[in-house]
Amino acid sequence: MAAPRLIPSPDLIGRILDIESAYTLSRLRVLERIPGNPIGVAYRQLDDGIVALMARHLPSPSFNRVIGLRAGHEHHLAPLTDWYRGNGVQARLEMVPGYYDSALGRELARLGYYQSDFHVSTICEPGSVDLADKISVERVTDADRMEDYLDAYMAGWGLAASDHDRFRQNVRPWREEPGWTLYLARAEKRPAAAATLYVRAKIGYLADGATDPTFRNRGFHTALLRRRIADATAAGVEIICSGAQFLSASHRNMERIGMRVLFTRSIWTPL
């Protein structure tokens, strides 16, 4: 019998936004624990379910964004954009179908923001995806594998060589973070691709897949998706989700294996 389909609803969207926020906060708190907080990590969690994230000295869109805005929140926009601008940060504000309304759009336009990009959130049910794959994927269970994971991760995200040592030092605690499982795929014994599974509140979030450009178009991203879906299913989750830039290779790989789009958010950034 086919697994029951998850029907789009405000509650389901809210659960996906919650796990995205929780995962990104977990990443930021790893950086916040560095003595002296050199990355300039800060965040605000408002009573209305809004999470505003900031890393002043790390111009990553994922770390400088506002999640959870919805109709009726337009009064929060000016204080939040002032907070980012006052810290010299260009923030992105995310608008989600079903939560968005014209008052939010008018206020964002008044503040000098426009829709600059789009990002899909994808989902599937446990048991709904074919998990067979020829590529072997390892769990990162020791320090040596962690270094190989970081090799693949840094190559996949295009980190400058001058940043490698500092990045390694900053993020080695990922292996010990609650709810995280790290994965590594190899090609000819070399680290080729890396990815993370984050499990919380009966949801498995497939996060941060990255493939060394040398090994792209060989199925590593898809193999990492399938392995994480299998492990999330074994962990007893109710929902499996991920995300990608609209029409990217990652988005297409998710669709190919049977994940489907729950919503497409618009990304608002300053003109």
Image (tube, rainbow, N blue to C red):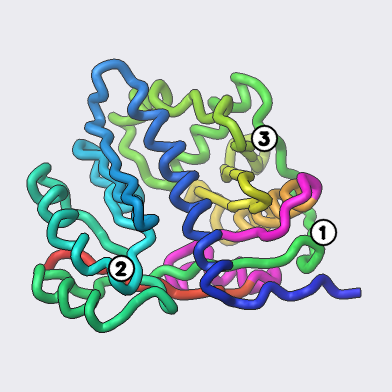
Name the residue nearer the viewer: 186 or 31. 31
In the image, what residue type sits under mark 1?
A: Ala
What separation in Å lies between label 2 and label 3 (alpha carbons)? 39 Å
Q: Position of residue 196 (x, y in %)?
A: 58, 43
Q: Is residue 152 magenta?
A: no
Q: Is residue 102 above or below residue 134?
A: below
User: Which residue is painted at 65% across and 77% down in the image?
Assistant: 7
Left or right of residue 116: residue 156: right
- Residue under pointer 2: 267
Quadrant position of the N terminus in the picture: bottom right
Question: In the rendered image, which residue does mark 1 sit on?
Answer: 132
Tell me, yes or no, whether the highlighted magenta stretch contains residue 254: yes
User: Which image quarter: residue 125?
Assistant: bottom right
Residue drawn at (10%, 68%), measured in percent from left and top?
111
Sort mark 2 into few (<14), some (14-19) or many (20+) by Cα contacts within 10 Å.
many
Q: Is residue 197 visible?
A: no
Q: Residue at x 29, y 41 (%)?
A: 43
Does residue 144 appear left or right of residue 33 in this picture? right
Q: Are marks 2 and 3 in contact (CB under 8 Å)?
A: no
Name the element at disc 2. Answer: strand
Q: Amino acid at mark 3?
A: Lys
Disc 1 to disc 2: CB gap under 8 Å: no
Q: Which is in the foreground here, disc 1 or disc 3?
A: 1
- Please provide the residue range marked out in magenta: 234-259
| x, y percent for residue 262 | 55, 74
